[in-house]
Image (cartoon, rainbow, N blue to C red):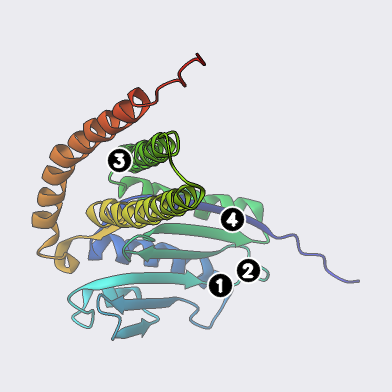
């Protein structure tokens, strides 16, 4: 009779976390301990990538986080053990401090629901304790950047449109002059949209770099991270409100410059 295995899986992403080498060791120990009773072969797999991406360390012992083999600065850590389709419970945890796409991801799966839920709750408790807790503020910063760029783009586009319409309404303008004005207007609109996209991309990258998804602490900490964070916070507090005020002013001026057509005499 064929045995039917039912696989279940639970996943979760943590926007911002800070971990030191002892927390990483504890998480790796939990992952290893959940699989070890069901196999005689070591299943723990640890991957550590240096910050410059030139060094990759692979290990099968959680003690690697407490030794001297780790790079001084790291960007990624992956911890896994077991196979969800085969074992009662298996887990994969990744910590990615890469700029713009960083974050912590947890996946627990297996063939026994009680084992999966137990392992998930244990790991989730460790990762919840490592959260920085200001991910909502980071989301607000992203929304503020989007609002600033959006309002500024609309204001500039409307200003270009109003200027083009005013020229076309000028008395004595010829047909070829009208085509030139329309061509210049189209180029101005295209330049505005292109510049807006580039500014939005750079601003979003700035916010992501200022508030990374994963920060490594303790012996793995980046010595310049705290200084850069203070600078980024200062710039954010000063520049973002100023840009919001400027974008509102540009939008207001653009709307105010739209004059209704004069009634026919």
- Callout 2: 10 Å neighbours few (<14), some, many (20+)? many
Q: Which mark is drawn over residue 115?
A: 4
- Callout 1: 10 Å neighbours few (<14), some, many (20+)? many
* Separation of residues labelled 3 and 4 (CA atoms): 39 Å
Above or below for 3 versus 217: below
Q: Secondary structure at mark 4?
A: helix
Tag 2–tag 1 contact (CB < 8 Å): yes
- For disc 3, the marked residue is 141
Judge by depth and name the residue closer to the eye, 259 or 137. 259
Q: Earlier in the sequence, mark 2 or mark 1?
A: 1
Residue at the image point whose x is 49% and y is 15% from the top: 263
Q: Earlier in the sequence, mark 1 or mark 3?
A: 1
- For disc 2, the marked residue is 87
* Foreground disc of the pair 4, 1: 1
Judge by depth and name the residue closer to the eye, 39 or 170. 170
* Separation of residues labelled 2 and 4 (CA atoms): 10 Å
Q: Which mark is drawn over residue 82?
A: 1
Residue 167 relative to residue 182: left or right: left
Query: Residue 92: x, y in percent?
Result: 49, 66
Picture quadrant of residue 216: bottom left
Judge by depth and name the residue closer to the eye, 181 or 246. 181
- Callout 4: 10 Å neighbours few (<14), some, many (20+)? some
* Foreground disc of the pair 3, 2: 3
């Amino acid at each position: 009779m064929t045995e039917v295995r039912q696989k279940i899986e639970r996943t979760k992403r943590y926007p911002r976390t800070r971990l030191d080498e002892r927390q990483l060791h504890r998480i790796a120990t939990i992952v290893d301990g959940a699989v070890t009773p069901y196999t005689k072969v070591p299943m723990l797999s640890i991957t550590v990538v240096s910050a410059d991406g030139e060094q990759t360390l692979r290990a099968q012992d959680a003690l690697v986080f407490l030794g001297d083999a780790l790079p001084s600065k790291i960007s990624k850590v992956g911890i896994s053990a077991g196979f969800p389709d085969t074992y009662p419970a298996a887990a994969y945890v990744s910590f990615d401090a890469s700029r713009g796409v960083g974050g912590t991801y947890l996946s627990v799966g297996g063939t026994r629901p009680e084992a999966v839920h137990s392992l998930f709750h244990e790991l989730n408790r460790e990762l919840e304790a490592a959260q920085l807790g200001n991910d909502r503020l980071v989301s607000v910063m992203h929304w503020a950047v989007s609002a600033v760029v959006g309002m500024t783009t609309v204001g500039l586009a409307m200003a270009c449109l109003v200027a083009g319409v005013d020229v076309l309404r000028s008395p004595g303008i010829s047909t070829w002059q009208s085509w030139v004005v329309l061509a210049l207007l189209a180029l101005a609109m295209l330049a505005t949209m292109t510049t807006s996209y580039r500014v939005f991309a750079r601003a979003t990258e700035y916010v992501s770099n200022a508030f990374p998804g994963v920060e490594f602490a303790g012996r793995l900490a980046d010595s310049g991270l705290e200084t850069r964070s203070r600078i980024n916070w200062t710039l954010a507090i000063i520049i973002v409100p100023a840009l919001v005020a400027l974008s509102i002013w540009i939008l207001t001026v653009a709307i105010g410059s739209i004059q209704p057509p004069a009634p026919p005499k």
